[in-house]
Amino acid sequence: MTKFIFDGPDDARATVLLAHGAGAPMDSASMTAAAQALAGQGLRVARFEFAYMVGRRNDGTRKPPPKADKLIVEYRDAVDALGPIAGPLIIGGKSMGGRVASMVADELFATGKIAGLLCLGYPFHPPGKPEQLRTAHLEGLSTPALIAQGTRDPFGTRDEVQGYVLSPRIELFWLEDGDHDLKPRKSVSGFTAGDHMQAMATKAADWIKRVTG
């Protein structure tokens, strides 16, 4: 049975379902900061974990994550487990969680189950391997999507991503000097991690209002 952590009002204008990244659980510092920032914008946020991460909690072993495409069924199940919600549903996640959501988005969008896709730090390629792109399915994506990305994210910097072929349905929101957790170096950028999370949440709320009408 899928377990969720909820943030934000029950009667929110939209609900955002977020999955975690490959190495950290749904209650990691980054996931918690993102969920609370989005909730602060009046959104309902639901976080969940894939089975391999639940297994880590239960037996204490660090099981490696399955390949992203093997987690698609679990993401579908999480959408179904949410049950009735107030307002439209946006799916997404942190890093790998967002990637899995992007792989199931068009199917769910076509059937009216979701209204959009929100990715926080999309893993465009493995660090140090820019030739191993994970963008083929993003070229023809039909689901409205917002990707919040740090300009120095080792999984896809601004300079790299600007050269990719991506669907016109995808909007990129760049956070100056942000890393894979969207965190900037304050001494370099003048911004704090809190500043960036707030900026992400404000942008996401505005975008969700726009794509859901």
Image (cartoon, helix red, strand yellow):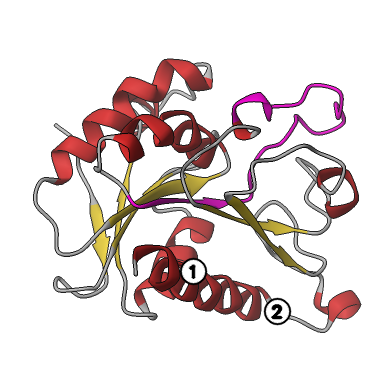
- In the visual, does 77 lie left or right of 152? left
Front-most of residues 183 and 92: 92
Q: Amino acid at mark 1?
A: Trp
184 vs 180: above or below = below
What mark, if any, has residue 207 been given in the picture?
Answer: 1
At a point 47% along the width and 56% down the height, the residue shown is 31
Q: Position of residue 198 (x, y in %)?
A: 55, 78
Quarter assignment of residue 182: bottom right
Q: Main secondary structure of the magenta part?
A: loop
Disc 2 or 1, which lies upstream in sequence? 2
At a point 25% along the width and 43% down the height, the residue shown is 112
Using the rendered image of the protein, determine whether residue 64 is visible from the camera's viewpoint: no
Q: Position of residue 106 (x, y in %)?
A: 42, 34
Q: Amino acid at mark 2?
A: Thr
- In the visual, does 111 lie left or right of 23? left
Range shown magenta: 115-137
Q: What element does badge 2 sit on?
A: loop
Q: Is 134 part of what is drawn in magenta? A: yes
* Distance CA(mark 2)–CA(mark 1): 23 Å
What mark, if any, has residue 192 been given in the picture?
Answer: 2
Work out which residue is located at the far bottom of the displayed protein and give it: 190
6 vs 115: above or below = below
At a point 80% along the width and 34% down the height, the residue shown is 127
**Mark 2 crowdedness (10 Å alpha carbons): few <14, some 14-19, many ≥20:** some
Quadrant assignment for the N terminus? top left
**Mark 1 crowdedness (10 Å alpha carbons): few <14, some 14-19, many ≥20:** some
Quarter assignment of residue 42: bottom left
Work out which residue is located at the far left of the displayed protein and give it: 84
At a point 36% along the width and 29% down the height, the residue shown is 107
What mark, if any, has residue 105 been given in the picture?
Answer: none
Q: Is 102 part of what is drawn in magenta? A: no
Using the rendered image of the protein, determine whether residue 43 is visible from the camera's viewpoint: yes
